[in-house]
Amino acid sequence: MSEHTTDEAQHGAAIELENLTKLYPGSAQPAVDDVNMEIKAGEVVIFVGPSGCGKSTTLKMINRLIEPTGGRIRIGGEDVTDIDPVKLRRKVGYAIQSAGLFPHMTVAQNIALVPKMIGWSKTRITARVEELLDLVGLDPGEFRGRYPRQLSGGQQQRVGVARALAADPPVLLMDEPFGAVDPITRDHLQDELIRLQHELHKTIVFVTHDFDEAIKLGDRIAVLREQSHIAQFDTPEAILTNPADDFVSGFVGAGAALKRLNLTRVRDVEITDYPTVTVDDPLQEIFNRLRSSGTNEILLLDKRGRPYKWLRRGDLMRARGSLARAGTLVHDTVTRDATLRDALEAVLTDNAGRAVVTGRRGEYTGVVDMETLMNSVHELLEADRLEALEAQHELEGARAERTHAEQEGEGGGRKA
């Protein structure tokens, strides 16, 4: 991440929830009942649970959009339960579903909202807006003057995250922020959040109803029952391999081994290079490059170095001087922060059995193929098989010890 214009970027702060409770007037039972939780500085914690279990209420009590009925909230060791809630919200970023941008304000004005409220100078605000747009992958020159209605859903969410980060808060609360966008855009936004967190190290509390999203994003996951009672609070891997009870198992669902593909990133496996050409290269040069590459296809990049089309030899023979109608468009790509599950889905939609890997601005960085992904799947399945065998052996050993102890006891009784 580039540095702030005037000061160091602020990393995450620990959050402590102590006996946190919310009882609405007229209700017989609390919506949130006596929640105790410690979230480490710089950690991504996901709240997941059934609709109406109180996960969003718990989240909103952290920045006191909903006032607690009882209990304490500490951020960075400071008890924020009794301080001015408006001042608190300026220190805690908040991103919601559908971005929640003000429609009459430009992108730059939306992002600048909190810095302006807390008295930043115009120069500092302008620099921060530029920095954040760049950080979330939107070209400042192209987007700063646009209005929300001129943006796609994914672009609006990126601006929403930028606005939440504008005053560099140590804590970022996210309430189902990607729930209203299509699945492909959602995957890319999740990857973007993972990349941002590698740079920013904020403390992020994220609400979702999607367990696969929780596995992909969370350092730890809090599986919540009714009234936000904690069923299990652990790492994604621990929950997948050792769910606490049947309630948690219901969230894990079938195919735990395949869900573990969400724990491994594209950057963790081999990414191969592929021969590439650009739209500015002469047709004969493209043909020569393909012939010398030893492959039967080549990747055509656009003027910005982004994947555009796959070209085969037959495509070039039929091109007749123009690539306008030649080749197969690249429809889906993955980033290095995408999970192997994302990559597998992208590969399966591509008849040739590979997916293009891109950088933060969509530029080509390599290719991941089906063979690499299947090897990873087989390794996970084998690890699960060995783990199950080990657990079975431990169970059999415990039974044998118990039987032996019982026999010893019976023998002693007979002697007596």
Image (tube, grey):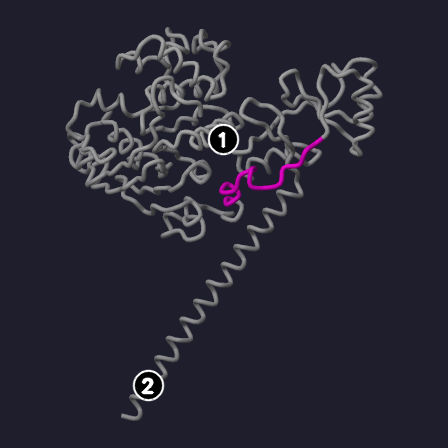
Q: Is 106 drawn above or below residue 81 in the view shown?
A: above
Q: Position of residue 40 (x, y in %)?
A: 32, 40
Residue nearest the observer in this picture, 256 or 15: 15
Which residue lies under the disc numbered 2? 410
- Up the image or down, 378 lies above or below 105; here it is below
Q: Mark 1 vs mark 2: which is more N-terminal?
A: 1
Name the kind of residue labelled 1 in the image: Asp
Which residues are drawn in magenta?
A: 259-274
User: Is mark 1 in CB contact (under 8 Å) with mark 2?
Assistant: no
Q: Classify 191 as above or below 109.
A: below
**Residue drawn 25% across the image and 27% down it:** 63
Q: Considering depth in this image, is 119 or 65 the residue closer to the camera?
A: 119
- Residue density around tag 2, few if under 14, some if 14–19, many if 20 or more, within 10 Å: few
- Left or right, 302 with reference to 255: right
Assign the N terminus to one quadrant of the image: top left
Q: Nearer the viewer, mark 1 or mark 2?
A: 1
Which residue is located at x 29 percent, y 32 percent? 59
Image position, residue 319 (x, y; %): 81, 17
Q: Which residue is mark 1?
A: 191
Secondary structure at badge 1 equals helix
Q: Nearer the viewer, residue 415 or 38?
A: 38
